[in-house]
Each structure stands twice: as C-alpha cells, then as structure tokens.
Amino acid sequence: FVPEVADDGEDAWFLGSTEDYAAIVLDLGLPSIDGITVLQRWREADISVPVLILTARASWRERVSGIDAGADDYLAKPFQMEELVARLHALVRRAAGKSTSVIEVGRVALDARQMRVTVDGARVNLSSLEYRALAYLLYNAGRVVPAHELNEHVYGIGAERGNNTLEVLIGRLRRKLGAKLIETRRGYGYIVGTDGT
C-alpha cells in the first residue's frame, strides 16, 4: 500500500471524495470533522471505498456506531501492524470479489489466514520476523521494496537496526525458501516475483 495522510476531517472528506483509493483507514478522532461524520458523508455521496475505522475508543457501542455509519471493519488501538495490513488486504479482496487468503509466487505459498508458508506444498517453519518480511515482500510482489521500508515493517518504525541485520534475515529466508525467490537490488532494496523458482 502507498498511504496518503489527511491532517483533519475536512482533508479526509475531500481526499476520500476526489481520489480513488483501494481502502481507507479512518481515525474517529479527527480535528474539524469527526471520523463518523466523514464516513457518513462518504456513504451519503455513494462513495463505496472499503473503510477500516482505527481508534482508541474500544467500547462495543462505538464499534457498532462505526459499522452502522458504513465502516467495513474496525480496529482498536493499540494494534499490531501485521493485523492492520491483513485486515486491509481482506477488505481490498472482498471489494474486488476475491476471497483467497493465499498468495503464491513461484513455488512459495503464504496462507495469511493460517500464517503458514509452503514450498512445493511442504510446510516451512519461519520465525515471526521471517514471516513478517516474507509476507510484506509477497504482498508487494513485482515491486522493489526499499530496504528502509522493509526494515520498518519488520522491526517497527524508529527501530535501530542496521542493514546487516536485514541482510541476515533475508539470507535465512533464502536458505529456507530457495535462493532465487528474493532478489537484492543493490542500493535499493528487495523484490520477489521476477523469477520465484
């Protein structure tokens, strides 16, 4: 995903009304116009983009009001980035009429629902960090993922990890999944999906 950020409810309303997004993550606590009002206006204007509400409000009443206003999903803070990404992918798949949770690139398949990875049908055990890195690369298959972006996704924003740490992680994935799946683009990052054998 390539995110675009709105600073307040006015901006969110404008961007959601004028841009064609795959999905929107909407915070209820926006300044100027609250998230529920923005969502109601989008739905009244027949804007059907999938919307995931993200908020610190965790009571069931607030979840119900968000869903009633037209939200497709709801996630309370704090949350894990993997859950947010998985939910967004599910929303986009449903909107596109797809229901599979399996991503296949070459001989490798990742089942996001069961958090299982296979090579030629045989299960491969991955650590949580290896799984995060692989899932992110597979979801971005065919695109060079900059090393800093993958680093932030795997270790968290602001994590103090050197490029060597990421290279070691990628090396472990190559040993487990096959050397050709993940290509290094020196000076840029990593890509899957160009060969995948």
Image (tube, helix red, strand yellow):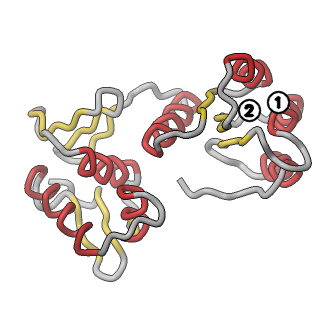
Drawn side of residue 121 relative to residue 93, left or right: left
**Residue 179: quarter of image:** bottom left
Q: Position of residue 159 (x, y in %)?
A: 41, 65
Residue 138: numbered disc: none
Quadrant holding the C terminus:
bottom left
Question: Which residue is rendered at x = 37% and y = 70% of the image?
Answer: 160
In the image, is 125 to the left or to the right of 161? left
To which quarter of the image does residue 171 belong?
bottom left
Q: In percent of the image, x 83 and y 46: which residue is there?
A: 17
* Residue that badge 2 annotates: 48
Quadrant of residue 59 in the image?
Answer: top right
Q: As drawn, is 23 to the left or to the right of 106?
A: right
Marks 1,2: beta carbons within 8 A: yes
Left or right relative to 75: residue 83: left
Q: Residue at x 47, y 45 (%)?
A: 81
Residue 26 in view (yes/no): yes
From where the camera sits, is residue 51 visible? Answer: no
Q: Residue at x 40, y 54 (%)?
A: 140
Query: With respect to residue 20, does 99 lie above or below?
Result: above
Q: Which is nearer the eye, 21 or 175? A: 175
- Given residues 31 and 196, the one toward you in this image is 31
Nearest the eye: 31 or 135: 31
State the SS at label 2.
loop
List x then y, in percent, for residue 54. 65, 38
Q: Judging from the image, what secondary structure is the residue with disc 1 in?
A: helix
Comes first in the chain, label 1 or label 2: 1
Residue on which the image places disc 1? 43
* Disc 2: CA contacts within 10 A as few (<14), some (14-19) or many (>=20): some
Please state which amino acid type lies under the numbered disc 2: Ser
Mark-to-mark CA distance, 1 and 2: 7 Å
In the image, is residue 187 above or below residue 21? Answer: below
